[in-house]
Amino acid sequence: MFKTNYVKHVYEDLVKKNSNEKEFLQAALEILESLEPYVEKHPELEKNKVLERFVEPERFVQFRVSWVDDRGEVQVNRGYRVQYNSCIGPYKGGLRFHPSVNASIIKFLGLEQVLKNSLTSLPMGGGKGGSDFDPKGKSDREVMAFCQAFMTELYRHIGADTDVPAGDIGVGGREVGYLYGQYKRIRNESVGVLTGKGLSFGGSLARTEATGYGLCYFTEEALKTMKEDSFKGKTVVVSGSGNVAIYACQKATQLGAKVVAMSDSNGFIYDENGINLDVVKDIKEVKRGRIKDYLLYVPSAKYQEGAKGIWQIPCDIALPCATQNELDLEDAKVLVKNGVMAVCEGANMPSTLEAAKYFIEHKVVYGPAKAANAGGVATSGLEMSQNSMRMNWSFDEVDQKLKEIMTNIFQNTYQTAVSLGNAYDTLAGANIAGFEKVAKAMLAQGIY
Ligand code: NDP
Ligand code: 2IT
């Protein structure tokens, strides 16, 4: 699997030290494998142990979060923050609240975030955090109590110029509001310490839409460059029905495509007339319900149990926007057999490594997560700029900047892939383009 001894040893050492962290090792393997051609040409990396330092987080904090539920019972959760790499700017990355969250998931997301943030071209290092707290089925008061308890520890590790968290799975506007309120209360400071804030207290217009919109801008640019084509007239499948999925569906539809399916962790809906997004928003954003409820509004649609069945639906473009490893080699084979032309990732690491390689081998336009979904964190970077200036830009200004950033990320990724000899290997393109800047900054800043 590895061609160079140096990279192989770095990976083997990582396996020894983190043997039970499968998501983290999966992300590290994908990145290290594809960095080999770059590492071969740059002996200074081995000499200065840059890869060893790159895969090891600068800091990893784990903490207890105790709070009281609506029955008066004490609940205890685990909180995390990984501050992975700060060589190009303050740590930046979301918080995930989901029962599956553990050290492996936080570290895989943190490592990906380092390269993603570098690709945005904005000065942001990489971090990630979260908790095994499950917001599903909790009252607003319980979510508030948890967020306040979580921030009562997290506040000492973050800051507007140190580490700036945001949302991810299970953390949206409601959670960021409670977290921000608690930070402000403890520090007596109104600063841009979190992004994804409400518009009335420092949030940026277009941050809510940014990841899904950015994904579609990236995909549109990729289709244009690699296939002389576009979203227009295409059939699209979007997995998930959360923040990223909803705004990917909206932008794909605006660009002339028909989105026929969406999902949640229980199952998926198929609507041959095109998804009615107002219905999905009402179910998910207002009622916090299940995607199955779509049938109550649109009885002609179909629902099937089991989220993975969604990849059986024939489509031109697939946008996985739910979670890691939701699309495996078998799914990739079905998509390719059904004629998919593009698979671009809104979620983080939704395709297994085997699935990603299968897309690349079969000349599918493949948008790896750290490039394709970078619009969210890029717009977070724009929110930080606005907070520092104490100014607000209009929706169109932010959206225009987002579009430019996504176009540049695609071109940078693609040109790097071309220079490596395979235009379809955007996985290597994104990893090397992101890594180059981080490696140079690490070398320039000396051993630390
Ligand atoms: P949300 O919490 O808004 O939505 C998550 C969606 O994914 C829900 O539909 C959820 O279904 C589904 N999902 C979650 N876990 C699983 C699972 N184990 N199996 C199947 N489906 C699952 O999160 P986001 O939309 O913000 O995040 C979606 C993905 O996008 C994540 O991978 C995240 O890391 C990534 N991302 C998010 C960014 C952002 O700005 N928010 C930026 C870049 C990437 P259910 O309700 O049933 O749990
Ligand atoms: O995975 C991601 O890039 C995010 N969840 C967004 C992070 C951010 O800081 O906006």
Image (cartoon, grey):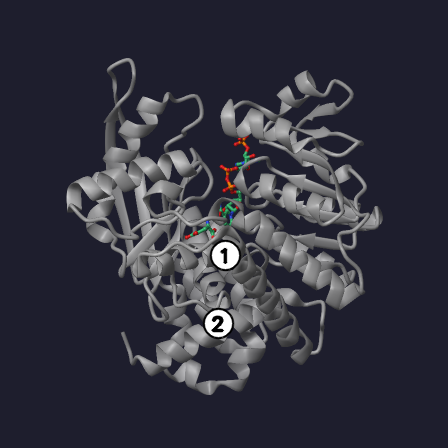
> In the image, residue 439 lies at what x, y percent?
42, 76
**Residue identified by numbered label 1:** 398
Q: Amino acid at mark 1?
A: Val
Q: Residue furthest top?
A: 71
Query: How far is disc 2 from disc 1 in space, using C-alphas?
Result: 26 Å
- The quarter holding residue 292 reads top right
Q: Nearer the viewer, residue 431 or 177?
A: 177
**Residue identified by numbered label 2:** 435
Q: Nearer the viewer, residue 273 or 316?
A: 273
Q: Seen in the image, is 143 located left or right of residue 207?
A: left
> In the image, residue 13 lies at what x, y percent?
41, 65
Vertically, is 265 above or below 406? above
Q: What element does badge 2 sit on?
A: helix
> In the image, residue 219 lies at what x, y percent?
67, 57
Q: Nearer the viewer, residue 152 or 184?
A: 184
Q: Nearer the viewer, residue 79 or 217?
A: 217
Q: Is mark 1 within 8 Å of ligand 2?
A: no
Q: Amino acid at mark 2?
A: Phe
The residue drawn where x is 16% and y is 42% is: 186
The residue drawn where x is 43% and y is 21% is: 137
> In the image, residue 395 lies at what x, y percent?
50, 51
